[in-house]
Image: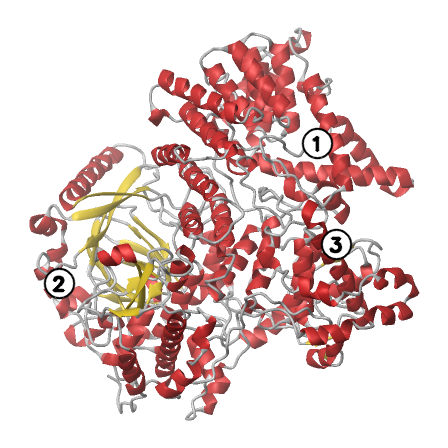
Amino acid sequence: MKSCGVSLATAAAAFGDEGKKMAAGKESCESKEGSSCLTAEEREALGGLDSRVFGFVRLHEDGARTKTLLGKAVRCYESLILKAEGKVESDFFCQLGHFNLLLEDYPKALSAYQRYYSLQTDYWKNAAFLYGLGLVYFYYNAFHWAIKAFQEVLYVDPSFCRAKEIHLRLGLMFKVNTDYESSLKHFQLALIDCNPCTLSSVEIQFHIAHLYETQRKYHSAKEAYEQLLQTENLPAQVKAIVLQQLGWMHHNVDLLGDKATKESYAIQYLQKSLEADPNSGQSWYFLGRCYSSIGKVQDAFISYRQSIDKSEASADTWCSIGVLYQQQNQPMDALQAYICAVQLDHGHAAAWMDLGTLYESCSQPQDAIKCYLNATRSKSCNNSSTLAGRIKFLQAQLCNLPQGSLQNKTKLLPSIEEAWSLPIPAELTSRQGAMNTAQQNSSENWNRTVPLTPVQQQVHSWYLTPQKLQHLEQLRANRDNLNAAQKLILEQLESQFVLMQQVRHIAEISTGLHKGQSSHLAGPNDEQPPFSAGPAQYLQAASTAIQKQTGLQTLPSNSVTQGAALNHLSSHIPTSGGQQGITFTKEGKPSGNRSLVPEISRHVGDKPNGSASLKGLSNHVQQLMAEPVCSPNHGDSTSPNVQISDNPQVSALLVGKPSDSGDSGACDKVSNFHSTICTKTNNSFASSPSSVISTATPSPKSTEQTVTHSVPSLNSPHSRLHTLNGEGLENSQSSIKTDLPIISQKSGSHVIPSMSVSIYSSSSEVLKACRNLGKNGLSNSHILLDKCPPPRPPTSPYPPLPKDKLNPPTPSIYLENKRDAFFPPLHQFCTNPKNPVTVIRGLAGALKLDLGLFSTKTLVEANNEHTVEVRTQLLQPADENWDPTGTKKIWRCESNRSHTTIAKYAQYQASSFQESLREENEKRTQPKEYSDTESISSDSSGRRRKGPFKTIKFGTNIDLSDDKKWKLQLHELTKLPAFVRVVSAGNLLSHLGHTVLGMNTVQLYMKVPGSRTPGHQENNNFCSVNINIGPGDCEWFVVPEDYWGVLNDFCEKNNLNFLMSSWWPNLEDLYEANVPVYRFIQRPGDLVWINAGTVHWVQAVGWCNNIAWNVGPLTACQYKLAVERYEWNKLQSVKSVVPMVHLSWNMARNIKVSDPRLFEMIKYCLLKILKQCQTLREALTTAGKEIIWHGRTNDEPAHYCSICEVEVFDLLFVTNESNSQKTYIVHCQDCARKTSGTLDNFVVLEQYRMEDLIQVYDQFTLAPSLSSSS
């Protein structure tokens, strides 16, 4: 990996008299710059400090000297930036980012990292930079970008020394994003890593247990929690939170026993939790809930009182107190408690509902309606339809009352407006006093953070009383006429208001914590809410002053499960000072006038990246405008906005010197430039082997091809910044290069070596170039070229299609006879990349296929006990996808998995048909009305769909690979043309040498109307063949491959994993995004050919069966897309079903390739793997590790790492235990080293002789072109 820095000799020369030169030039900076000179010892100490020591170096107490040194280095760097007018080496900014990160000055760290990114073309090679950037994004809760940055670190350097920290943070972020499968995988990867970490193994185990609880896998969660309690020397804080969660689960979850037993266990667990940690306000609150549910009112009050005393005032606690008062027939006290709850959290739906119920019980329907309306406006409201009905009922009652009857009636309670202005109870005002004190303290030490533990939570003055809100509005209305003191008060109130809105967003995550004893006296909802509703991509701030006063990173959490996972257990990943707590906020709309870092795209021109003009900005606060570093295409998203440096001159240079003209339209130029460079290649990855090979290793036979593919990298959709203030960047840097005191990093990062050989080198030249590389212990297992950045989704094709082209006709071929089916142009038409899908009509009839062999009746007769995977789904129109309540359209597609047999599913399929016939007969006697079961087009986007929806079952993934069980069926398919057969010489998947179920074998699908195959691309982007057996039809929706990046973006916005989640696109969203959708009906006997990479989703119109499998045409396009998806899967930590390395070597053995592009891509893959094998061998030999010959058996599948699921080729790392037991549990090199740093617990098994690989490599040459196409 790349390190930041030049030699210490250069640095020493630069620092010799730099301070004196600066002082002579600028008297005002004399004293400051005099202290900026770094001694040789200081430079040596700084050489080991970068983002990788974040969380491990202490800057408080014993680390005060390090903190002072870092501060001095930052001042020195900033002064030199001023002297150089920003014309400094990019590594300079990277180091500045690292130092600011360690000082926890996140705004300045981000600005420096952004600057490095804009200047450094191959920034992605620098793992320490990507890691530091990810930490900054993580701090700002910008999870979307943090995930991208962390994934890229692991991609470019799988053995990164802080991989455990990355997996831990990825696990937390994916849990917040409700991607539970990914979350669990990363937590487990963190758990097996023996490297140091800021969380202990028991804390990581707690997060895994809590993940199960969040998924409502309560038995698994209970087992995991109980196993944790068996751990020896379990820290008291971990023990307390584990017992707390067990207690809360027993109170909430019906599956854990009858009510009396559950409550008894819940109270016992919570009491034990309080013994371990008596100061946990959350545990006291839970205990109060338990006492309340069994009628122990006095004990409940005492527990709630303790909760308020032990922790920050909580809306949940006050709401529960209100429920108790209401049950005790003390309406006035209940009113005050509810008002406290909604004042603390204006969006607390449960409190508003209970308050409405209270008013209704006191015959004050007008106030009740207002409360119910407030409840429906809350994002945490989960029964808005019930409330809407209640509101209508009360409104009808009001209309029927005689005029004046309500005015003449004595009110039992003050109106909601009057109650809002009542004095706040002493309990709350005492807490407010503490909060104000905390705010004053934090303004003095703004960059120090306090861990949010149950013992001591940091409290902020984010809450504004109604009086303060009114004062704020008055000051805003008279902003232009305020004096200095009033302006200061306005600024303080606005700061508090921003933070209050942020905390509201956090509170809105909670779906309510209570359910009362009856439907009307509910209290908060008893169901435990999800960990969080979504990623916080935006964290708002009005100015640096707000950040300095409050410390945005320590916002408290209102959610029970957030408290469980974050506010307790010391589950806070430390900052560089070891004290930082993790806190998450909920995504929300900007609450201030500007977001944390507005987006600006890179552009080419005389003006560098940065704000258009600095005029008019404060002398103390400079706003940075920069693009989020790891976001390739974010046209409708904003990056966190940052306030940087107190020195406006330094700020200006960090973001790039502004132009005098103040070009505010810089961003507008991007689209024009983008269209000029990306016209030909915007549909493919930057790292596609076809393009990189031609650029890096041009064929001596073709210079024309080299030019074709030497297009700027699409990884960054907009051009890299090449000029600075109108000068060439290289010139501006080299002129003062020796004046830059870049500190030489002495850490263990390596520069990714560039290739010294090409695909036209012999194997001996390759091995010679690899000599001694293994001593570095390098591990870079990517097929793609070293010079390629991590893969990214393609941007939407430019220019966008006009609206009338978004519903294109589906390419269709009608066959009349067998000769038509075997006509060569049919093969060429289907595999043409311009045709994302082809429907071959009448294929079964033309070939006289016996489709009856695949009918349900025949299947039952052949193998009635054969396993069927069942997906339980909601029956909906094909072009719509609603949430279960039918209130809004969503992308998430409900599809729960179970298993049955062919016989049982056949019975269900038949009974479903009979039931439909009965319903049809009943309808004939009734007036015609559309039902939810009919596939009618949607005529409105926002209209509510009538629910609840009927549940259906879809029989999927029925394996027909056994040629003994399914001999007749499989033999029938040999009648098909060669290019669509399951097995053929021209099918890449036939060269795997082993079975991959569903890809090079046949799978069957048994359907009832409404059965859905959700949106997806085929595994590794291979083509697919699908034949409808009938008797019913299927409806298909298809999107071309080059738009998959757009659908990936939609999935991310909807908290869905494009590769792993179940999703059904909203056609209106696609239309607005200018995405073309092919839509057609597949009838019985029709074959649908899905071309490489095409996105598609399918719904059954009638009762039918389908058969499907994958094929891999021997084309450059197919191979390129397969390799790209292989790399994308690796970046996303998803297993590639097709082992592309293994396949590439088999292709080299078995196939003569005459297409130059395909040959170059395969040859390059062989070159890369050959180099890796030799390098790894040398590294193991140098380390004294023996390599044991193991060999391969016929039909032996390719191997994958049992931990991270990447493909492992040739050298298998197997534990001693599994080797002795002959179970051979395989690890990749990186996971083996994480588990056992010296590999003492592993043996290395060799599957191929190096001589054999060399022979295959040398013998794979470009074959002469065939005179005619096959």
Q: Which residue is mark 3?
A: 68
The three-letter amino acid code for the residue at tag 1 is Tyr
The color scheme shown is secondary structure
The dot on residue 744 is none
Q: Which residue is mark 1?
A: 463
Name the secondary structure under disc 2. Answer: helix
Q: Which residue is mark 2?
A: 970
The image quadrant of residue 968 is: bottom left
User: Are there few (<14), some (14-19), or many (20+) residues within 10 Å of tag 2?
Assistant: some
Residue at left 41%, top 85%?
768
Q: Is residue 685 above or below residue 299?
A: below
The three-letter amino acid code for the residue at tag 2 is Leu
Image position, residue 169 (x, y; %): 51, 49
Residue closest to the eye, 655 or 236? 236
Residue at left 58%, top 58%?
52
**Is residue 294 found left or right of 1199 in the rendered image?**
right
Q: Nearer the viewer, mark 1 or mark 3?
A: 3
**Is residue 942 found left or right of 111 in the rendered image?**
left
Image position, residue 927 (x, y; %): 31, 34
The image quadrant of residue 121 is: bottom right
The three-letter amino acid code for the residue at tag 3 is Thr
Name the secondary structure under disc 1. Answer: loop
User: Are there few (<14), some (14-19), or many (20+) residues within 10 Å of tag 3?
Assistant: few
